[in-house]
Amino acid sequence: MSRIRDACYDPDKKVQPAGYQGRVEIWPGIETSIGRCEGDELLMQIDQRFLAARKETALDVLRRVMLKHKDDGELLGRTEVAKALIGQVVVTPYNNLTYRVESIDWATAPVSLSTVSGPHGKMTFQQYFVQHYGAAGHITDLQQPLLVSQPANRALRRAGTHEIRLVPELCRMTGYTEQMRSDVRMMQAVARHTKLDPPRRKAATEAFIHRLTTNSNVQQTIHAWDVEYGKELVGVEGRRLRPPQLQQSGKEFSYDAGKAEWGREVRSHPLQQTVTPVRSWLVLVTEQHRANVMGFVRLLLDVAVGMGVHYNQPELGIVTDAVQSYIERVGKDPRVLDLVLAVFATDDEQRYSAFKQFMSCHRGIVSQVVLAKTIRGQPGTLRSVATSLCQQINAKMGGTSWILNFGFESYPMVVGIHCHADHREQKTVVVAAATYNRDLAQYHNADRFVDTDEQAMQSVASLIQECLENFRAKNGAYPADVLLYRGAISDGQLKKLIDTEVSGVRSVIGGLSTNKKIALTYMVVSRNVGTRFFQENGKTVGNPLPGTVVDRVVTRADRRDFFVVAQNVREGTASPTYYHVIVDDAGRKMDDLQLMTYRLCHLYYNWQGPICVPAALMCAKKHSQLIAHNLHQSPATSLRDRMHFL
């Protein structure tokens, strides 16, 4: 196997999805880690990983982008190439290593001299690759610029290897393009190899264990250390929390844990808190999809009546497929619009970002984007789409779809903190999404742009202060409790987080003028964990049902931690969410923290079902992704407090 960053892949066992042999290869892999868990047990996490290696090279991408912008000038062409390549991960087949592209060196080419010396002095990059890799290092385009990457290995950085030069022609692109992701059949073909259901994943894990415990070279090495690998998966007893009772306009209902979805109930009753009538709104669509969209709008209006939301008839705006056409149509509309519904013909991230930037930053109008293919289909399916769309719009305009009765005497401020790195701009956006009402359903979003991880941690204190002041402005007093869920943190950053971020938040809270000290609860939330749970059903295994909690055997002896599977998974194997409680001033019981956390996964109004993390953290994540995607301005002030999520 070949080690690529934190995982090991087996290029010899690569597979090509049926029908797409010439476009992408799937390399199967394994990621493992060993840690000391409860009872002083040493346990190994084993998780399957897959690397998508495309046939096209970085040079193919470079040429395609330059050709597309050949009439726009070389400077603009290079800018567009940087957008397409910087931040991307490439794999070099000559050594099966991956690199993240940090920049493009337009002044250096394969014929330039490298830092490596040969028998006759300095070698060119071309000579170096041919000498070291033979035919695999053969280069045909001698004038192509080189890619620059920072070494992922810390030892190389300490040794002074600060930058690595790569030849685009020898770098294969990884991951999926937007065009690939929009190809439903292709993604289905890929999913047959990558989305392993519990029986297949369990079998693959046991096959790896068998390789470990029967390979003579492995056995010889570990026996020299007096170590032995176990031969079976570890059994652990979990428990399942009952689905909570949801409330919607006086009606109380629950849901079937096996399906974990309540779309029918949402459509059957008025939403908990609806917005004022949507009087003036605009639907933008291309002529090609006009008839289909008008039929869907009629269905949307019908569904909205049952949900207690009133829409006036919209005005239809016919546009071309170019984003500028959408923007110009909104820009010349003389009315004060409550809503713009834009129907895009295809999934295009740049078009989406540009449209959202204009709507949120320049016009301050609530907007909703939907793909034309999403609103085609059977009436039953379309009613579900219309339900989701109606409640999303209601939430964006300040409404609430449903609530849970938490039974608070004094309700807390629940905060989600998420960081999103923009590799193209070398910036990180840090977002705090904090509740400010009793139902924990309204959010204030605060954000900062920073350059480093340390600055990100330092900025959290000021974000929390802004959220606390907003809470006081809305309620006349500060909250008695702050319950904070912190995402996007690795174990290696934990000490720095405690020393810098938590300390800063404590200073902010301690400096407030309150009658009673505010209790802080700080939890680090990890989605990228290698732990997987299989629920035994007789002789077969399946996914744990939503609400499954595991807080023993596989948790750490030196931590207050637990796993929760909150969501229902229809494809593949459920991935649990890991919670590490690093601060608990309120002294809550673990059972109470687990129940509170699970229930908070039910308050995200983009889906009629529980999600994998508390809603505040998901809102922070969505907000950070949106403004990081070319939205380097804060949303219009008029939208900041009333948008549940952007």
Image: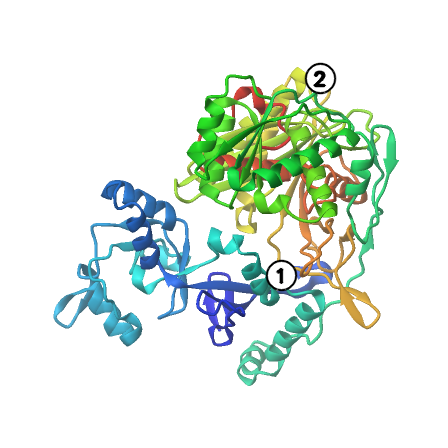
Q: Identity of the amino acid at label 1?
A: Gly
Above or below for 111 versus 594: below
Counting from the top left corner in percent of width and height, residue 527 is at 62, 50
* Residue beneath the point at 81% across and 28% down: 408
Above or below for 198 versus 76: below
Q: Is residue 172 left or right of residue 319?
A: left
Q: Identity of the amino acid at label 2?
A: Asn
Counting from the top left corner in percent of width and height, residue 261 is at 77, 46
Residues at marks 1 and 2 touching, judged by CB atoms closer than 8 Å: no
Residue 475 is labelled as 2
Q: Marks 1/2: CA distance?
A: 45 Å
Residue 86 is labelled as none
Q: Nearer the viewer, residue 514 or 403?
A: 403
Dot 1 falls on a residue whose secondary structure is strand
Q: Earlier in the sequence, mark 1 or mark 2?
A: 1
Q: How many marks?
A: 2
* Residue beneath the point at 60% across and 39% down: 291
Residue that numbered label 1 is attached to: 35
Counting from the top left corner in percent of width and height, residue 552 is at 76, 56
Dot 2 falls on a residue whose secondary structure is helix
